Structures are given as C-alpha cells and as structure tokens.
C-alpha cells in the first residue's frame, strides 16, 4: 500500500513505533508500516490525528491531504524538506513564456486524446460480438479522435490557429471537441449509468459524473505528489490558467491519465452505480480501490514492466527535465 484513504467518521490516526495506527470509533485497530506510505487522504470530518503522526509524516515525506465532500483537496500538510530547487522553478517560469510551453502542452493533450481513444477501443473489443451498433459507434469516435490528435503536431497546429486567437484557445477548442464526442459516444453506447447524458463537473448530482469527479480527485493526489517530488511549482500551469488556490500544473499533467486511470474504472463499475442516487462510503471505497489497483498494476515500458505509479513519477521527472534542459517531452500512451 502506498496511498491510504480514510473515509469514516470518528477514526483516529496515530503512530506506534514506526507504524501508522488507525483506530475506528468501535475501538478496532489497523496498522501499517509508515515506510509503505506516500500519501494519506482524509475524506471525512471528525477524523483526529496525533501531532506525533504529523511529525513523522513530515520527516518521511508522506503527504497528508484533507478533502471536501467531493474528494477535492482543500488542504495539504507536508514537510519543509522539499526537493524544490530554485533553478527548476526559474526554468519553469521562463518556459511558460516561451514556445516550449506550447510544445509540451500539445504533447500532453495529444496524449490525452489518444488515451481517450484507447479507452473507446478497449471497451469496443468486448462489444464487437455482442453489440455491433455500439462497437461501430465506438470505432467511428476512435477514428475522429485520431484525426483530432493528428492536428496537434506543432507545424500542423500552428497552421490552423485563427488570427487574433491564442494558441491556448485553439488547443482547448480541439481538446473540447474531442472530449464532447468522447462523452457523447460513451453515453450513446450506455457505458455509464442510464442517468448519464453529458459530462458535468464538480457539484454534479448525477451518479456517474459524481463518481468521475471523485476519481479525478483521487488521481489529483497521485499527480500532485509526483510533481511535488520534482521541485516544480504546482500552482503555475503551462496551459491551464493560473487561478488562486488551483494547482494548475497538476491539472495540466492529469490530462494524460484521466481516461485510462479514472474513466475506464468508472465504466467498469457501471453496474454498482446503476440505481444509486449518491456516492456512499461503499461506492467511494470501490472507486478508490479500483484506481489504486490500476496505479499498482504494471505496464510495459521499453521491454520492462513497471508500476503505473512509478511510470507517473518517471513522467513527472521527464517533464521537469524537458523544462530545465529543453529536451523533448513525450507522453505515455496506454495500450488497449
């Protein structure tokens, strides 16, 4: 276990030796070595923590995330021994105002679209023999996604930017068009609950959207931790606008992973979400566990099998390297 989620009212978190101790309101105790943890997410009010635990987490680099009812992080506790290097952040701020930011942003969104396409094809292969109509819709949308992704090569992209329009506006327009077709197709093929009609952001009361939003909040803590290890400034994004209190760089990098790590798992949980009106503790646990399992699963990278979580950290370091050393950043495309 690398990432622990606490979602029950009345839990107490403390330490015993080098172990985290979780005691529920009935007095039952669960323990795990602190050496196995990278983050702890507290998702419920009424959870208490000992100052000793906070101290031990700080010196060990374990981050504590406190979230609201939707799973969005509202506070983070971490130690002062950060790996941030002034030169890294100076290079980042310089990069944001240079053509390099556009190059990286194009690669991230291209990767996002290709990973959305991979999700469509992943479910299409299961529907090919049982639902030809859905299979054809998924295939058509996958073809459209390829067309959109091909527009994101630097030379092609620059040739289609309208006059008086920033590259960010054009990029987000292409990304939005791909996303609209992606979600429209998912709805048309009934891959999510019957109540899902379109993608809705934070605050949605529709069960599938609420599950997606909750999943993205979990993903955010993973990406946050990976980027924070590089020394990059997580509140200064490459293409997401900088809004006070928003970790814009985390939002940027999350785009690569949303579809494969979150969307795919929420679709797999369709039957558990059907007929539900809100996310209860059991559903939240199912979502968190499925996302954690995906992060602990392995993918093949240049002939070696590595955990997705480690891949994410590697990609974060490559992003930092691209910003500092002006090397090419290459996103990771999941194979379906």
Image: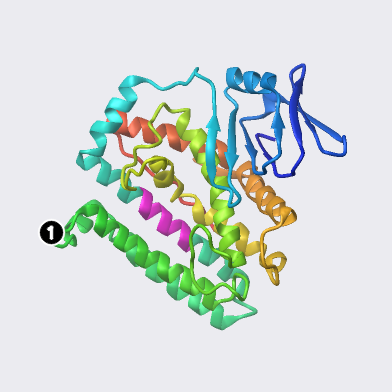
Q: Is residue 111 magenta?
A: yes
Residue shown at 52% from the left, 78% from the top: 188
Which residue is found at the position 35% from the left and 44% from the top? 243
Percent of width and height locating residue 37: 66, 29
Residue designated by label 1: 164
Q: Is residue 321 magenta?
A: no
Image position, residue 154 (x, y; %): 23, 51
Q: Residue furthest left?
A: 163
Observer-nearest of 329 and 247: 247
Q: Is residue 161 left or right of residue 323?
A: left
Residue 33 at least partly seen: yes
Where's the N terminus, which quadrant? top right
Q: Residue 113, position in %: x, y?
A: 41, 59
Q: Residue at the location (60% across, 59% down)?
A: 211
Residue 107 drawn above or below residue 140:
above
Magenta stretch in the rendered image: 108-117
Q: Residue furthest front?
A: 46
Q: x%, y% of residue 63?
A: 58, 29
- Asked if residue 313 can be seen in this view, the reply is no
- Going by the image, does 232 lie left or right of 124? left
Taking depth in this image into account, of 48 and 280 the one nearest to the observer is 48
Neighbour class for label 1 at 10 Å: few (<14), some, many (≥20)? few
- Name the image quarter holding the C terminus: bottom right
């Amino acid at each position: 276990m690398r990432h622990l989620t606490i979602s029950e009212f009345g839990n107490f978190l403390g330490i015993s030796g080098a172990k985290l101790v979780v005691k529920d309101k009935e007095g039952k105790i669960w323990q795990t070595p602190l050496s196995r943890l990278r983050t702890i997410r507290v998702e419920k009010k009424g959870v208490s923590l000992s100052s000793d635990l906070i101290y031990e987490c700080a010196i060990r680099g374990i981050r504590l995330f406190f979230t609201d009812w939707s799973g969005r992080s509202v506070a983070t506790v971490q130690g002062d021994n950060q790996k941030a290097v002034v030169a890294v952040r100076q290079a980042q701020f310089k990069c944001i105002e240079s053509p390099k930011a556009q190059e990286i942003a194009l690669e991230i969104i291209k990767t996002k679209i290709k990973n959305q396409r991979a999700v469509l094809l992943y479910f299409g292969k299961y529907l090919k023999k049982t639902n030809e109509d859905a299979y054809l819709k998924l295939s058509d949308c996958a073809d459209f996604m390829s067309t959109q992704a091909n527009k994101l090569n630097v030379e092609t992209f620059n040739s289609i930017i309208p006059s008086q329009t920033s590259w960010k506006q054009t990029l987000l327009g292409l990304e939005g068009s791909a996303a609209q077709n992606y979600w429209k197709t998912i709805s048309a093929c009934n891959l999510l609950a019957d109540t899902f009609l379109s993608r809705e952001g934070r605050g949605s009361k529709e069960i599938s959207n609420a599950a997606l939003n909750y999943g993205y909040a979990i993903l955010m803590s993973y990406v946050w931790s990976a980027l924070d290890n590089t020394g990059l400034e997580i509140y200064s994004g490459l293409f997401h606008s900088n809004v006070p209190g928003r970790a814009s760089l985390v939002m940027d990098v999350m785009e690569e992973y949303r579809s494969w790590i979150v969307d795919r798992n929420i679709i797999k949980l369709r039957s558990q979400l059907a007929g539900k009106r809100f996310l209860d503790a059991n559903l939240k646990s199912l979502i968190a566990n499925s996302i954690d399992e995906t992060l602990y699963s392995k993918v093949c990278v240049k002939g070696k099998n590595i955990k997705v979580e480690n891949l994410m950290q590697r990609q974060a370091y490559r992003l930092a390297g691209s910003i500092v050393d002006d090397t090419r950043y290459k996103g990771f495309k999941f194979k379906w």
